[in-house]
Amino acid sequence: MIKNNCLEYFFEPSRCAIIGASKNTNKAGNQIIKNLISSNYLNNGNKIFPINPSETGEVYGIEFKKSFVDIEDNIDLLVIAVSSNRIDEVVTDIENRMDTHGDLKAIITVSAGFSETGTIEGITKQELLLNCCRKNNIRVIGPNCVGIIDNINHFDSSFILGTKRVAGGISIISQSGAVGSWLLMAWASEKPVVGFNKFISLGNMADVNTVDCLEYLGNDEDTKVIGMYMEGYKNGRELMNAAKVVSRKKPILVLKVGKSKISSKAAQSHTGSLAGTDKIYDNAFKQYGILRVDSMEELSDTLRAFDKVKLPKSNRIFIISQAGGPGVYCLDNLADNDICNLASISSDGEQKLTEALPSFASIGNTKGYIDITAAADADQHRKAIEIVLEEDSVDALILITVPTLFVGAKDMAYSINQAVINLKKKGICKPILPVILYGDSVSEARTILEENGIMTVPTPDRAIKVLRQLIRYSLYLREGKIC
Amino acid sequence: MIKNNCLEYFFEPSRCAIIGASKNTNKAGNQIIKNLISSNYLNNGNKIFPINPSETGEVYGIEFKKSFVDIEDNIDLLVIAVSSNRIDEVVTDIENRMDTHGDLKAIITVSAGFSETGTIEGITKQELLLNCCRKNNIRVIGPNCVGIIDNINHFDSSFILGTKRVAGGISIISQSGAVGSWLLMAWASEKPVVGFNKFISLGNMADVNTVDCLEYLGNDEDTKVIGMYMEGYKNGRELMNAAKVVSRKKPILVLKVGKSKISSKAAQSHTGSLAGTDKIYDNAFKQYGILRVDSMEELSDTLRAFDKVKLPKSNRIFIISQAGGPGVYCLDNLADNDICNLASISSDGEQKLTEALPSFASIGNTKGYIDITAAADADQHRKAIEIVLEEDSVDALILITVPTLFVGAKDMAYSINQAVINLKKKGICKPILPVILYGDSVSEARTILEENGIMTVPTPDRAIKVLRQLIRYSLYLREGKIC
């Protein structure tokens, strides 16, 4: 198989045609056009061509074409959104188009009903499409995928509902359209909305596969971190070789499912992926620099962290809590983890804290932890952060605070931000994860911090998990192996 | 010590005085009056008496009193919100009041600066207050607590910000004011808001302690489930004896911190509680019917579940997923749990499912699991639920669905609700936990279900954890021991 390595046409085509375009708002061929327009695809002189022999007039102000033949422009990307039963016609159209124009570079097939059905009929349809594309040097994503989004290039060819198109440094490769949609819907619901760069729904991987995408995103300057949802991959060696190269350049996080016999069997029915023995994957991930996460929440949190938070130098962390209970809860979660250790601080540092903090503050009783108590005002929060992060022995900080009558959430946010600014002036740029408890009543404070580039997490347990992965990657870059 | 067992005055006093009442909105003595008024405390003929010798005029329309002497009504409950440095004066006032009126039944002391400081001065102050109360047969909650809320009796004496006062069957006992506030703020941010009955912040437990509250809530008809945040308890036998009685009547969930040496030491600095060996607590909890949870999220989810969801008969659960990826993810989480098993269904049931569902649906490949695929419409969701729950071998159901263009979130919600109604007509009332993925875009659908009494959870992993605890309690009632 000849690969033209033209994956860029999946993210920044200048002419995009949709076979199966529709006026019916319940059809993928309608939503894709809506999403393309909403993503501002048309603003840079790009063009959309809705194709449907049965439709007349316009869809979202764009005139329908009866077929390819009617299009004079060169088409880069074709989206196939018709029933798999019509794949014969589509393939004939592609052949004709390539004979006359030779223009198509990439095809996204969102339609289902191909090899994922496990039927001979479905497999044959997929082969038909694939053979046509191989012959004509066209790359294919799908079938049975939900599309591609690129927020930097303003291109959304997906039929996902409810996403918000904010750009960021995260890119996603998902073997499940639903899991991908879930992540994007979650990010659209965060306050502030979590931005991302590229989203790739792989579907059946008839042609473009995990490794192609991993390599492409590895070389993509705008991708700071790669997140993957994976059920299995048939060529493990190829995947690990790619991971080895890419993971030195940027972190790769994977949520690999099919851990148990039962779930692995279900994964096979789903995307036909052999999930393989989980232990083998687990070891290979560690060896080749892939950071495995255990839950969707951890995937989401850690992707955000790698995009926003500076890597800690090592694993010595400090916890400042303004509230005893949540502080102890955080320490419990720390004790359960295998990577983060508590940092000692100097007696000089302890002395400074004693002078700066309320008299009841608990300093020096527990290694790596102080309870500054609810009596601590906003400026005492600032001082505590600065004193602790000025210590050479501290690599990262979790700050837990519960806004009260005495100190409002916004004042706390401004003080935390000020501490970060003051530390920067002294050349100290260490990760700090503020946990402001909780919910809607502190969302303004969290937004203030996020807008100043300081990532926040909702709970202490999630803060520990995030720091754990940041440290794992930091140690990997130094030691060449994931702990 | 004589106990008058008058805990009811903490929840439904008809006359409530606040020493340290203030016009200053940054003071607890202001917020408490604001919260009392917001909770509609005054609507049933109850009265509030703000006391402060230095204040004149009104606070929120209620006239200040210079001292107790000026109050003619009988006072049931006194809230102390002045600095601990003024405890001498307060105690003298209480003594005088009891001499002249003999009316006080209960005192909530929110002020800090008592035994929790670990200083002789603080301990002496607490002793002074306690001795006065013992002598006069007055029960005390605190010091160093954030107050009491009772949403059924419309009484909020706390100074917590951001709560919403919706009534429900959950009651909370918290050894940390901050953890309690965190939970209530979390529930206030849920859509729809999570209701609760009583919230008790214990503080230093000078008098009223965990066991008093556990017994009281055990006898409280409006409390369906009890949630506790615990750092430690000095009289383990007393606690376990109380738990043994109460846990037969209603579930008790506990988040017990101080698992590790480090966190246990920090807990000791916080509330002076000896956390003890975690393993001992763990075994005792199991023996005496207390359900232990591992995180705040699990505490919140399972409390909601015990309030809303019928107990499953046993541990045989079934998973219906409309999306492959999230389904496999759910199976992974199921494999990690120690209680829930997958349920077999009859060949007759499988036949019915095959007839009712889309041709690509994956039925019978994985025990206890079907993937109905994105091709399943709303009515096919309904049919699948009904067919599965009609099976005798199924005790509970998780339904995972990702709304798409083809089936909207609201339609799915109505279909799920219809299935529950249809099953009820046939006398089948088994727990069903719908997981609609994800976020803001499905919040209307979740609200439809919640308003119809069907609890929803945001993710498949959380659904497994919730069912696990429901099953643990169900098996405990049958077998007398927590698995």
Image (cartoon, coloured by chain):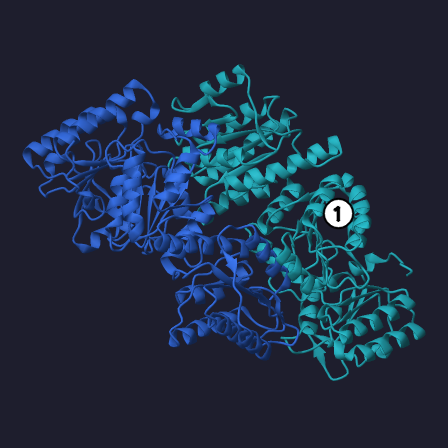
Chain colours: A cyan, B blue
* Residue B166 lies in quadrant: bottom left
Q: Is residue B67 above or below residue B452?
A: above
The x and y percentages for residue B144 are: 31, 32
Q: Residue at x 81, y 74 (%)?
A: A124
| Relative depth, front residue between B150 and A269 | A269
Q: Residue at x 64, y 39 (%)?
A: A469
| Relative depth, front residue between A4 and A97 | A4
Chain of the residue on which disc 1 is drawn: A
Q: Along the horizontal axis of the image, is A93 left or right of A406? A: right
Query: Which residue lies most toward the right here?
Result: A99
Graded by Cα atoms within 10 Å as few (under 14), some (14 to 19) or many (20 or more), the crowding at tag 1 reads some
Locate the N terminus of chain A by quadrant.
Answer: bottom right
| Relative depth, front residue between A274 and A225 | A274
Q: Amino acid at mark 1?
A: Asp
Q: Along the horizontal axis of the image, is A358 left or right of B246? A: right
Q: Is residue B398 above or below residue A456?
A: below
The x and y percentages for residue B205 are: 28, 33
Q: Along the horizontal axis of the image, is A255 left or right of B154? A: right
The residue that label 1 is drawn on is A222
Q: Residue at x 77, y 74 (%)?
A: A120
The x and y percentages for residue B315 are: 46, 58
